[in-house]
Amino acid sequence: MFDWKKALILCLVGVPLLVVGCAKKEEAPAPAPVVEQPAAAPPMMAIAVLQPRGELTLNGTVSFTQVGDTVTIAAHVEGVAPGKHGFHLHELGDCSAEDFTSTGGHFNPTDAPHGGPADRVRHAGDFGNIEVGEDGTGHVELTSDMITVADGPNTVVGRAIILHEGEDDLESQPTGAAGGRIACGVVEPSG
């Protein structure tokens, strides 16, 4: 004799097991492929070592560090008269003239008027002033997106840094009325 009770219990227990057994198994998502990021390019660097004019005994360096499209300029001087002194990137890397006029004018590839480092319209070589304390030392850092350390028309490499005897007023044309050139250094690649 057919036992309806047992059949009903088997149906109630068996059907869910059958459904679970026939259900599509969920699979764990495949792991994301490992994508190696290219290593960040090391910064490009260049430096100018300043040589004094005539009998002066000052010294200093101006370094350029390019990361992406931005160049950080760091200038440090010692043995310089206290006060503000203009410093600029000049177009020619030639410090051979006694008064350093062999460096030509400020580096100015866009033929812009002279200005300060915060002015959008200015010479690419207008770095403003470095302030020297009573101890004869001065240090300044600034950034620019108008120059490069990399090869190209706006590179600093092969040009010269000039330190002036006076303050750049940031407006007089074409040089800022910063006075004579007291130190010069040719910018060369480093690191």
Image (cartoon, helix red, strand yellow):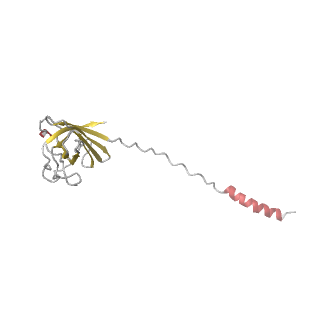
Q: Quadrant of the C terminus?
A: top left
Tell how many labels: 0
x, y percent for residue 176: 15, 50
Asked whether, in this view, residue 120 is left or right of residue 40, the answer is left
- The residue located at (38%, 43%) in the rendering is 40
Q: Visible in this render: residue 181?
A: yes
- The residue located at (51%, 49%) in the rendering is 32
Asked whether, in this view, residue 101 is left or right of residue 72, the answer is left
Asked whether, in this view, residue 184 is left or right of residue 19, the answer is left
x, y percent for residue 54: 13, 35
x, y percent for residue 77: 23, 40
x, y percent for residue 97: 12, 36
Q: Quadrant of the N terminus?
A: bottom right
Q: Visible in this render: residue 150?
A: no
- Direction front: furthest residue: 134
- The residue located at (83%, 64%) in the rendering is 5
Residue toward you, 135 or 131? 135
- Direction right: furthest residue: 1
- The residue located at (67%, 56%) in the rendering is 22
Residue toward you, 86 or 64? 86
Residue toward you, 96 or 8? 96
Residue 8, picture quadrant: bottom right
Residue toward you, 76 or 136? 136
Location of residue 49 with respect to 111 vertically, above or below: above
